[in-house]
Amino acid sequence: MAATPQIPEDVHADYANEAVRSALVALRATPDYEHLAAFLEALREGYLVVDVSGAPSKKKGHRIRTIRSTKGQLVLPLFTSMDELRAMVPADRRDLVKGAVMPAREALALIASDRFVAAEFDKASASLVVLRKYISLAASGEPITAELLESSR
């Protein structure tokens, strides 16, 4: 029989990844390669939240909700907390929102599950769109530096 996964004590319905949120705010305030590298490094730790509010599929269970860019391309919405996910909907519908708190690297790896061109973080407040190549880098174990990012433009 398979072991039941243990949920860490710090993961709960009100979980917030403060390190990622702080790095996101810093990057928005100073959009440079140094802050982008710090943000991508922060993404590797803790947990992120994905929206699973839609009706579950009989074959696959809950599916992650996606959004489309202005050009119709798939974008993966990710959140630093359930509060950020709930902020996406009107107050009277927030009780209908369902999110899954996932280890950050697993959430980032979802970028490879479809034809996503980018991920968007905390759409309702800080709203930052990050290209797929950077999300894939964060999901990997490769070192991330400002110099590496600048040279890979």
Image (cartoon, rainbow, N blue to C red):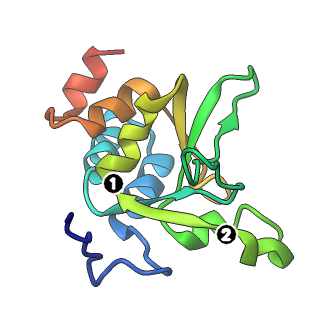
User: Where does label 2 land, which residue?
Assistant: 86
In the rendered view, tell whether residue 64 sits above or below residue 145: below
**Which mark identifies residue 104?**
1
- In this view of the protein, can residue 57 be seen by the observer? yes
Q: Do residues under tags 2 and 1 come within 8 Å of each other at their CB atoms?
A: no
**Which mark identifies residue 54?**
none
Q: Quadrant of the N terminus?
A: bottom left
Point out residue 80 in the picture as x, y percentages from the top left corner: 47, 62
Q: Is residue 147 left or right of residue 90?
A: left
Point out residue 66 in the picture as x, y percentages from the top left corner: 64, 41
Q: Residue 8 sits in which quadrant?
A: bottom left
In-front residue for pair 30/108: 108
Point out residue 22 in the picture as x, y percentages from the top left corner: 40, 63
In the rendered view, tell whether residue 152 sits above or below residue 98: above
- In this view of the protein, can residue 43 be seen by the observer? no
Q: Residue at x 29, y 38 (%)?
A: 138
